[in-house]
Amino acid sequence: MASNILQQYTVIVDFLGKTLGPDYEVVLHDLNPDHNEIVAIANGHISGRSVGGPLTDAVLKMLTSKAYQTKDYISNYKGITENGHVLRSSTMFIKDESGKPVGLLCINFDDSRFIDLHKKLLATVHPEEFWETSSMIYKPASASVEYTPAEPEAITENFSMDIPSLMQKIFEDATVSLTTPIDHLNQTEKKEIIQKLQERGMFQLKGAINYVAKRFCCSSATVYRYLSELTN
């Protein structure tokens, strides 16, 4: 049933990509646990992704917080490509008859081409000295907004090319405030990191247990035990 639903959306991806134009990336994600990947994409040059690419960190957080239970979509949040372009992103939850999410339809708008045109236009009417110091220069907003389940709109999405890169990004975000080297953390500190990783949807990714165990210099069984203790 889920595959039939998504099959219909592959046509929509192609349609929207051609209708909206090259500044809009349209992406269809399959949320089947055996896949969890991009199954259709239009204008993938915007983020550099292609079919087979992984979910994003923001999507994993949405799914972990069960945002789909109260929302049909989340619109106009910030996405950041690997080359630093800031996108305006929106995600719609594709649900089955029971309300379970089976896929995601995402649209990411890249306005960098229009920003360049804006700069060129202003440069034609202002002297160079003014242009170099002018506050009129368009500057994208800071990308430091932190997502919490209580505020699903306050999202910053990072587009990773593959699952190892995504796991690395999630792990680094969860440990960025550490003052102690990871291999010197005590058990309580490791559990706190495990909880942060769980909230960020890390353990929905295949291979996440082994990745975290390697970073913690411990066994996979230990990571499983920490997760079990957090849920009990």
Image (spheres, helix red, strand yellow):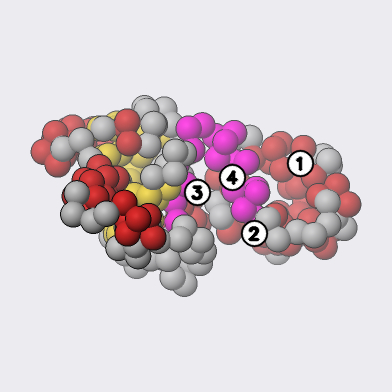
Of badges 4 and 3, nearer the viewer stands 4
Q: Earlier in the sequence, mark 3 or mark 2?
A: 3
CA–CA distance in space, label 3 to label 1: 19 Å
Which residue does the numbered mark 2 point to in the structure image?
A: 196
Which residue does the numbered mark 1 point to in the structure image?
A: 215
- Packing grade of label 3 (10 A; few <14, some 14-19, many >=20) is many
Q: Earlier in the sequence, mark 4 or mark 3?
A: 3
Secondary structure beneath dot 3 equals helix
Image position of 219 (left or right of 81): right
Secondary structure beneath dot 2 equals helix
Which residue does the numbered mark 4 point to in the structure image?
A: 169
Q: Can you give x and y, in whole percent of width and height, for residue 83 in the image?
A: 44, 38
Q: Which mark is residue 57?
A: 3
Q: Can you give x and y, in whole percent of width and height, for residue 79 in the image?
A: 39, 50
Q: Are marks 4 and 3 in contact (CB under 8 Å)?
A: yes
Name the residue at 47% across, 72% down: 150
Q: Can you give x and y, in whole percent of width and height, for residue 28 in the image?
A: 30, 38
Question: What kind of residue is marked 1?
Answer: Arg
Name the residue at 45% across, 61% down: 142
Q: Are marks 3 and 1 in contact (CB under 8 Å)?
A: no
Image position of 189 (left or right of 76): right
Question: What kind of residue is marked 2?
Answer: Lys
Q: Earlier in the sequence, mark 3 or mark 1?
A: 3
CA–CA distance in space, label 4 to label 3: 8 Å
